[in-house]
Amino acid sequence: MKLLIVEGNNEQTRLQRGAAGIKPYHLTFQEMLRVLVPKAKTDFAFPADGTGGLPTVAELKRYDGVLWTGSSLSVLDDIPDVLGQLNFADGIFESGVPFYGSCWGMQVATVVAGGKVALSPNGLEFGISKPIEVTASGKESPFFKHRKTPFTALCIHYDEVAEAPENAIILASNAHSKVQGMTFDYKNGSFFGVQYHPEFNTSEMALIASFLSEKLVKSTAFDSSKEVQDFCSQLREQKGLPLEISDYHLHTQEIMAWLRHISGE
């Protein structure tokens, strides 16, 4: 299996976060894939850094699937870092290669396919999500049929899908965001994505929370920096966490289901 991982952050953000010990998201995905599909070969694309060196539509067809990471960007911003990613995503749909996206990746795919993304009226969803319910359609989907009861996941997002693309099927939802999982077809391709971050592990979430501590308090997601640090300790020590978060294989189930689906299993 040959997979392309698309990094959602630009180089400046990657370097800034790297100084705080946070791995670039494309490497987080690569490490996850080494666990889930050890024999898979992976390449990277960096559309937020510019258009140079990006695979053409013809070159994209050599891949078995494309996985798009999260990002600190907002798809609502009319800036080159965003527009370059939207253009590249359109090329992926044109190529017909199966397309998966976490959080930002789902938002990019949504906008390209004619849907709408907006700032969530419920504010920031961060850390451990509100319980996610699988819809009736989701229970029949190869991507969610393994989820028998409501579950939680690691997450961080201000924006959400406000209007799904025309033929989209909503597979999962929660009290914060109606679209927590979705699939749709566009042009020659098919897309599956989720609003949360199955690829994150608890240690990475702790690093991100610590890095964003000031913003998290300002957003009222946490009452104080001490509360943030206590949450970071809980994540690092894996104390009192739901099993579907502390067990990485359980947390990554949706991506594993997609990988199996595109491989024909």
Image (cartoon, helix red, strand yellow):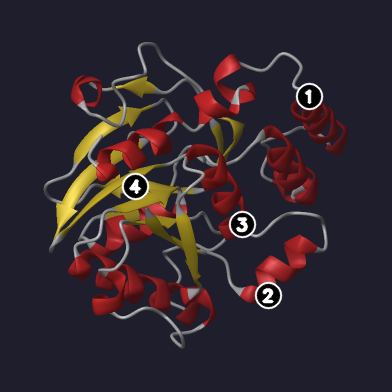
Q: Is 224 left, or right, of 37 in this rendering? A: right
Q: Examine the rendering and report whether any part of residue 71 can be seen.
A: yes
Count of numbered badges drawn on the protein: 4
- Specify the farthest residue to the bottom: 52
Name the residue tied to disc 2: 12
Evaluate if marks 2 and 3 touch, with contact meaning CB atoms under 8 Å apart.
no
Quarter residue 17 falls in = bottom right
- 218, 22: nearer the viewer: 22
Q: Which element type, helix, strand or loop, lies under badge 3?
A: helix
Residue 224: % across, % down: 82, 35
- Residue at 70% x, 56% y is 23
Q: For mark 4, what is the residue? A: 161
Residue 14 against residue 262 in the figure, above or below: below
Is residue 157 at all visible to an observer of this figure? no
Q: Position of residue 10 (x, y in %)?
A: 59, 72
Q: Residues within 10 Å of mark 1 (few under 14, many from 20)?
A: some
Of residues 24 and 10, the one drawn nearer to the viewer in this rendering: 24
Amino acid carrying label 3: it is Leu
Q: CA distance from mark 2 to mark 1?
A: 30 Å
The residue under label 3 is: 27
Residue at the spot of label 1: 234
- For marks 2 and 3, the one nearer the N-term is 2
Q: Could you give the CA–CA distance between mark 2 and mark 3, rounded to whole angstroms?
A: 16 Å
Tag 3: Cα neighbours inside 10 Å, few (<14), some, or many (≥20)?
some
Q: CA distance from mark 3 to mark 1?
A: 24 Å
Q: Amino acid at mark 1?
A: Gln
The one of 184 and 52 positioned closer to us in this rendering: 52
Q: Amino acid at mark 2?
A: Gln
Task: Look at discs 3 and 1 and give the one toward the viewer.
Answer: 3
Amino acid on which disc 4 is placed: Val
Q: Residue at x 49, y 33 (%)?
A: 252
